[in-house]
Amino acid sequence: MHDVCGALTGAAMMISLKHGRGLEEIKNTDKMKEAHLLVGKLYKWFEKEFGSVKCRDIRVKVMGVYYDSKIPWQAELAKEAGFHEYCCNLVGKVSGKTAEMLWDAEEEKKKKG
């Protein structure tokens, strides 16, 4: 839908898998705060790094115009403009940042005991 970037959404899901709550923990608001804090930090990092959390905005920033990838001729123009490579690099940066955040959260837990 070209709203919130899929890389950010997927990263938030990974954080939530590790630090979110299962059905048995649904009343544990402390655990919810941990996931919310990490996802919130990731969201703000992403917004600062890429200028927006919205795919559509990022596409316009990179290509100067919005090309809809669901329309074949526009998808071809986006490819020619190098958006695929940009998007792949963005996904790599987000994955790296998410891994770093998950690692740091685990290290912080170890320090706390």
Image (cartoon, grey):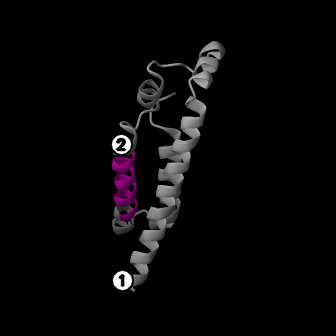
**Residue 109 picture quarter:** bottom left
Residue 42 included in the magenta stretch of the image: yes
- Residue 70 visible (yes or no): no
Report the residue at 53% width, 19% height from top: 67
The quarter of the rendered structure image containing the C terminus is bottom left
Work out whether 42 lies above or below 86: below
Residue at left offset 45%, top offset 67%: 25
At horizontal 56% and vertical 23% (from top left) the residue drawn is: 81
Question: Crowding near pointer 2: few (<14 within 10 Å), some, many (20+)?
Answer: some
Determine the image quadrant of residue 87.
top right
Residue 17: in sight, yes or no? yes
Q: What is the three-letter code of the residue carrying label 1?
A: Lys
Instruction: Give the image location of residue 39, x and y in percent.
Output: 40, 54
Q: Name the residue under label 1.
A: 112
Q: Quadrant of residue 69?
A: top right
Q: Which residue lies furthest to the front in this view?
A: 81
Q: Is mark 2 on a helix, strand or loop?
A: helix
- List the single residue furthest toward the bottom: 113
Mark 2–mark 1 CB contact (< 8 Å): no
Q: Using the image as rendered, state which of residue 10 and residue 56 is in the foreground.
A: 56
Foreground residue among 56 and 28: 56
Few, some or many residues within 10 Å of mark 1 (<14, 14–19, 20+) = few
Residue kind at label 2, given as amino acid type: Glu
Q: Is residue 83 magenta?
A: no
Which tag is nearer the camera, tag 2 or tag 1? 2
| Residue 47's disc number | 2
First-in-chain label (2 vs 1): 2
Instruction: Point out the stretch of residues depicted in magenta.
Output: 34-46
